[in-house]
Image (tube, grey):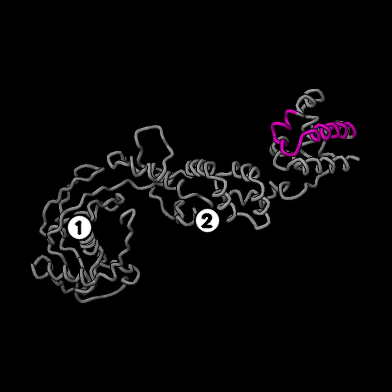
Amino acid sequence: IKRDNVEFWRQSERSDIYKSQLKKLVDAGLAYVSKERELPIDAQANFESPKKAQGQKRDEVIRFKNPNKTITFTDLIRGEIQFDTTELGDFVIAKSMEEPIYHLAVVVDDAEMGITHIIRGEDGISNTPRQILLQEALGFERPHYAHVPLILAPDRTKLSKRRGAIPVGEYRAQGYLSSAVVNYLALLGWNPGTDQETFSIDELIEIFDLSKVQKGGAVFNVEKLNWFNKHYIATLPAEKKLGYVKEFLSEKQFEVVSKNLKLLDIMTERVSTFGELRSIVNSGEFDYFFGKPVYKKETLLWKGGGDLEKTRERLVGVQGLLESISSPSFTKETVKEALWPYAEKEGRGSVLWPLRVSLSGKEKSPDPFVLAEVLGKEETLSRIEDALNLLS
């Protein structure tokens, strides 16, 4: 596969090529038809469907005539590796002249397609001696091999479905960005030798070096993946961020968010994935952005105490100060500047708490200056008026 010219090949459409190479081996006496009662286990899986092959019985298979030699190759990650192939015996390379199995098919494919480097997991090391024997028998040039460490579960066993692994598509469904996933996976078992952690695809292509791949497996840490994803969400332009958010909000919710990019930033800065955003929004945590809040008047009291009338007086004072700010200049900075001296005089909690509650209806929310900016002057004053009516 070339990065700028991707080609896809189906082994099921290359039968004539495999048959030709298989015949070449048999004619040269390097492989032979072996009469057998039942297909051995090592030949059950071919390049088509392992499940389809299971349980089939045959009278004959094609076996490679093993020269019983020692194979030595240099792994680009692990250095020199040596195998005594005697223990492999005469291994199966096809179920018939029409049906090659994995080892023969991939060796022919690699040679036909000009593959120079085979990079695969360390669990593929045991396949290498069989494939090198076939390459030599067919006169193919040996490619370079690099066996990368496996990704491990937290208990340092091989990551699998039983131990927390999920399909790549599921990460997309949960709201992970491809750039974050690629960046994180690139650093599992490899590092550039610097403190840099975030890389674009082009940067990874530029600096990746097999010599810096570690021999030991790396543990998959979802918390670290979430850190990367949060970083990439924060760096998204608003337009792209909206495109992702649209997939995780209802039509009505998205309509509100799309009209208020300040709200978009507040909501997304709270999450590591867009899936988390959907959960938070649906839990009602941000309901005050989608409609006026409903609450009991006692909630407006600072620390649950104080005087309702006094609280009302302070909200009236806040209302007057905010009315003096023009709508275009109604930002968290100008709101804070207008209210801070008054809050210092009357008591910060006594002034800012009822303002927060009147705007959100909740005890936990962004600070009232941020809320005021996001809601805008008209809606902020309207909600303060609702609180004053409630206190009356």
Type of amino acid at the residue the image marks with label 2: Ala
140 and 371: which one is in front?
371
Q: Is residue 25 left or right of residue 323?
A: left
Q: Which residues are magenta?
A: 309-337
Q: Which mark, residue 245?
A: none
Q: Nearer the viewer, mark 2 or mark 1?
A: 2
Is residue 73 part of the magenta span, yes or no? no
Q: What is the quadrant of the N terminus in the image?
A: bottom left
Q: Is residue 136 left or right of residue 175?
A: left
In the image, residue 61 sits, relative to residue 297, either above or below, namely: below
Residue 305 seen anywhere in this rendered image of the structure: no
Residue drawn at (76%, 29%) of the image? 338
Is residue 317 part of the magenta span, yes or no? yes
Residue drawn at (22%, 54%) of the image? 128
Q: Earlier in the sequence, mark 2 or mark 1?
A: 1
Residue drawn at (28%, 71%) of the image? 13
Q: Is residue 132 left or right of residue 198?
A: left
339 and 15: which one is in front?
339
**Residue 342 place in picture, x, y as percent:** 80, 26
In the image, residue 311 sits, relative to residue 3, either above or below, namely: above
Residue designated by label 1:
131
Q: Residues within 10 Å of mark 2 (few under 14, many from 20)?
A: some
Residue designated by label 2:
173
**Residue 360 place in picture, x, y as percent:** 75, 42
* Distance between mark 2 and mark 1 Cα atoms: 38 Å
